[in-house]
Amino acid sequence: MSDVTLEGVLYALSDPVRLDILRKLRAEGCPLNCQSAAPADIPKSSISHHYQILREAGLIRSERRGVEVVNATRCEELSKRFPGLMKAILDAAEAKPAKETKDKKPR
Amino acid sequence: MSDVTLEGVLYALSDPVRLDILRKLRAEGCPLNCQSAAPADIPKSSISHHYQILREAGLIRSERRGVEVVNATRCEELSKRFPGLMKAILDAAEAKPAKETKDKKPR
DNA sequence: TTCAATAGTTCGATACTCTTGAACTATCGA
DNA sequence: TCGATAGTTCAAGAGTATCGAACTATTGAA
């Protein structure tokens, strides 16, 4: 958690797929396997890549449980490091039109 | 402002150079020309590119004034669209170690 | 134990994006 | 009109994302 950077967090969440994954993990409350929290129409190699970025940014924690890998957010820890940040981002994500979660990444 | 997206904002600020530019514009209070708010060791073509991304994300407004282009933040407008977001990000940016503002973008 | 099924990861090729020097444009003062 | 200043645009190389194919890990059934 000490080498979690603000830039890394913002970059990780600048992709609609990853933002969506984090929202679902957050909403569910309990850990979910990779595909449960990801959009259905995305190749699993891409999903794996997105999870890796979320992990490296310090946003989620992953653990193998049997045949699957379950994921949980680290929002509580992040809130200590960056107070208010996760709440503001997730609130903003909820507030925006639902369709945008499917859009391609804006660049 | 209506086509400002959360993803676009997060992406724009996931780069330390752009985050630094926004911090300086915010700290100054009054509009600054492009190079005044940017790190000195970056080529001007790169600086121009970074400003373009900040503009397209809706984070700043730019206006030519004589021989230079002056820039101001749009944090007030953004706060209406995404309450608490800009404050949380800028607070987090202030809280982190100063050296990180010089680091390369983490990926 | 062996086999098949499930869940992810890794690899490699293609496509896209970032960075930056060079050339170009716009504005102003002499 | 010329020169200086401030940015923008262009193009090439480096870097990164995406996604199908191959691979690995785990489990449960035969």
Image: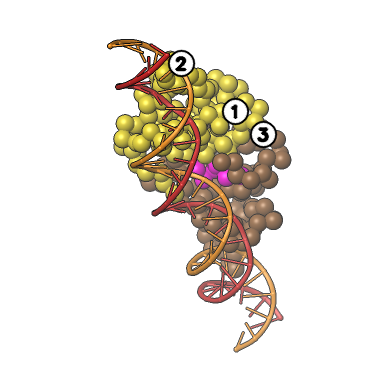
Chain colours: A yellow, B brown, C red, D orange
- The residue under the point 59% across, 53% down is B31
Work out whether disc 2 and disc 3 sit on a shared chain. Answer: no
Q: Is residue A14 visible?
A: yes
Give the image quarter of residue A34. top left
Choose between A49 and B73: the one closer to the eye.
A49
Mark 1 Cα-neighbour bin, 10 Å: few <14, some 14–19, many ≥20: many
Question: Could you tell me if the residues under marks 2 and 3 are in contact, i.e. CB atoms within 8 Å?
Answer: no
Give the image quarter of residue C7. top left
Choose between B70 and D27: the one closer to the eye.
D27
Question: Label 2 sits on what residue type?
Answer: Arg
- The chain holding disc 3 is B
Please tell me whether mark 2 sits on a helix, a strand or a loop: strand
Please tell me whether mark 1 sits on a helix, a strand or a loop: loop
Which label is found at residue A65?
A: 2
Identify the image quadrant of the C terminus of chain B. top right
- Bounds of the magenta segment: B10-16
- The residue under the point 41% across, 29% down is A21
Which label is found at residue B96?
A: 3
- The residue under the point 60% across, 44% down is B105
- The residue under the point 37% across, 44% down is A104
Give the image quarter of residue A76. top right
Mark 2 Cα-neighbour bin, 10 Å: few <14, some 14–19, many ≥20: few
Question: Label 3 sits on what residue type?
Answer: Lys
- Residue A78 in the image: x percent, y percent? 57, 25
- Residue B23 in the image: x percent, y percent? 62, 44
- The chain holding disc 1 is A
Q: CA distance from mark 3 to mark 1?
A: 9 Å
Write down the residue under mark 1: A82
